[in-house]
Image (cartoon, grey):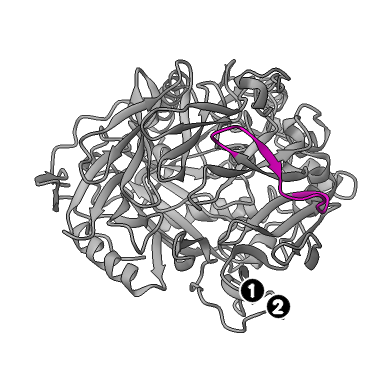
Amino acid sequence: MRKILRSCSAALLLAGMVISFQALADDVASLPPVADFFRSPEVGGVILSPDGERFAILIVVKDRMALAVGPSRDPGQVKFIYGFESGDVVRPYWVNDARIVFGVQYPADDENAARSFSGRGLFAIDADGENFRELISPDSGAAPSTGSNLRSRVLPLNYTLHAVLNDGSPNVIVGKWTSMNRTEWWHDNESLFKLDTSTGTAVPLFNTQPPFITSWLLDLEGQPRIATSFHDGRRTVLYREADDENWQSLGEFDIATQEGFIPEFVGSGRTLYIRRANPAGLDALYRYDLGKRTAGQEPIIEFDGFDADGYLEADSKARKVLGFQYQTDAPGSVWFDPQMGAEQKKIDTLLAATVNTIHCGNCLSSKYLLVKARSDRQPTQYILYARETGKLVMLGSERPWIKPAQMGTRDFVRFKARDGLSIPVYYTLPPGHRTGPLPTVVLVHGGPYARGAYWEWSAIPQFLASRGYAVIEPLFRGGTGFGNSFLKAGFKQWGLAMQDDVADAASWAIKQGIADPKRIAIAGASYGGYATLMGLIKNPDLYKCGFEWVGVTDINLMFQESWSDTTEDVKKFELPVRVGDPVADAAQFKATSPLENANRITQPLLMAYGAQDYRVPLVHGEKLRDAVEKTNRNVEWIVYPEEGHGWFLLKDNVDFWTRVEKFLQKNLASAS
């Protein structure tokens, strides 16, 4: 990764005043309160208008996230324009230089409350606060009325924002999903409509379209050109010429194994940017000629040891691809455009203590650029860069109460697992730590077929580090971001090689002198909860205790439980390949089931579940609790009535992590 100065004492000239970060040598004796790690951000995001002359910012007003707008030439003149009494404004987008769309998120919503993290519904408003309109209802029970009032053109909840066009019009593209049932949205069929945000009028883009479409790519003119369908365990990539309703297949691939290529961006002419494996087996970015139906031989973006995980940055007005924002061991940018590359160097020189990501609309012509500056110890700061003067103006900080000097340092390395496979791992050390083994928490990510950690400020490891614990986060086999062979190495390895990778990460930390071998806990949520339970079962001499939340406790329950957001397609086509078949692999499922082996959990255990969890229903926890308590008196059980698959309410976060702090103090206080 780009070398980041570990000292955060560099002074920054922002808006004519000097802002100094607290030096690492400052007093860190006073611990930040639990709530500081888990409270909602003070600034929820910033976006520049396409011309760069204004910015929209999400700020807290009366304990709710609200929308405000300010002029880039005078950022201090920020004006509140809209907020909800009982919900947060989320995911704002500029429709054009004068109009914005956004959604709403309610405090008790988890990630299953709507199709995505974009929240519920869709609303539009002018940048001056005028001409507000509800476009998509946030209420799942609402339906369009037939009268002539404002709600006559309000769309129901199964419509979602798909894209903004950036063509100067008041129009956006929305998608209509066939089902109103959240458990079907993952493998549904999306139809596209052009929606006028001023009138609420929606017009279908096609007379006919292929079935089972779940994703679309629009070209630089706002025309849908690429569609991807998911059906019967297959993923099909389809293409159409501009203004032609006939779709042609570019390839059909297996969903579970993630074979083939993934379309990423439609460029000018007949250029499609795709992600596919390079000769080293890592996903790289290639150009694909839609006329010849062939991909280029040489990748345009590739990384040693990492997939090309990221997105292309394009200038909406110039209709030009400018660069690639990526994630390897840390975030970074590759600019194809020399002007943007030069701007990146200037900004990095001014902000030497952070990774700095540039965002803009009409990047080449805008007078201003938005910079998101962050590091492992510094939550995201939003900074405006004036290109003519080279000055930086602080617009806001996501969590200004976080003091970098009180945060731990976070690093990335790789180690060899017992079978020789290279396993990535992030480890976080307490602030001010110099040497000597520490009480340690091995934190196992969920998914599991996902990337579990990044080089950034992260609440849970930083909270644990602030309490004096080393935190080890192994990116075990089966995760994404490190090539398809690494993903496939985790197939049917729940409780087996995937579990061994976690144990090997703990052993690595012991050998490095990081972890005290007699004071190691294992923890995690969802799949991480499963791995926590299996770690206590499989490696009782390694882990002294464990805490898990919303964890899977039995593989068979994922296939059997009806109250779940796991679709029948996933159960039929993906889980048998990735996890195993309930019939053919019945013996393996039993051997690697925490529920079936509950009597082997003898260490102290803390378990917590959400009563509204659709992903891992409460029955997972209840069954295991009942089984473990027959032979283990040291079990702490918590249910949060309002929560789903994770904690979203501050009171529940504070309660849970306070319990965790006491649990670890009690069980890792001594090496006995």
Point out residue 197 in the picture as x, y percentages from the top left corner. 55, 36
Give the side of residue 362 with respect to residue 203, left or right: left
Q: Secondary structure at mark 2?
A: loop
Camera-side residue: 70 or 20?
70
The answer to the question of whether label 1 and label 2 lie on touching residues, with beta carbons closer than 8 A, is yes
Q: Residue at x 22, y 46 (%)?
A: 73
From this view, report whether residue 426 is shown above or below residue 118. below
Point out residue 645 in the picture as x, y percentages from the top left corner. 60, 30
Residue at the left extreme, as displayed? 17
Q: Which mark is residue 291?
A: 2
Give the side of residue 138 with respect to residue 204, left or right: left
Residue at the front extreme, as displayed? 148
Camera-side residue: 596 or 560?
560
Residue type for callout 1:
Arg
Camera-side residue: 96 or 621?
96
Point out residue 463 in the picture as x, y percentages from the top left corner. 36, 35
Whole-angstrom CA distance, mark 1 to mark 2, is 6 Å
Range covered by the magenta-colored residues: 196-213
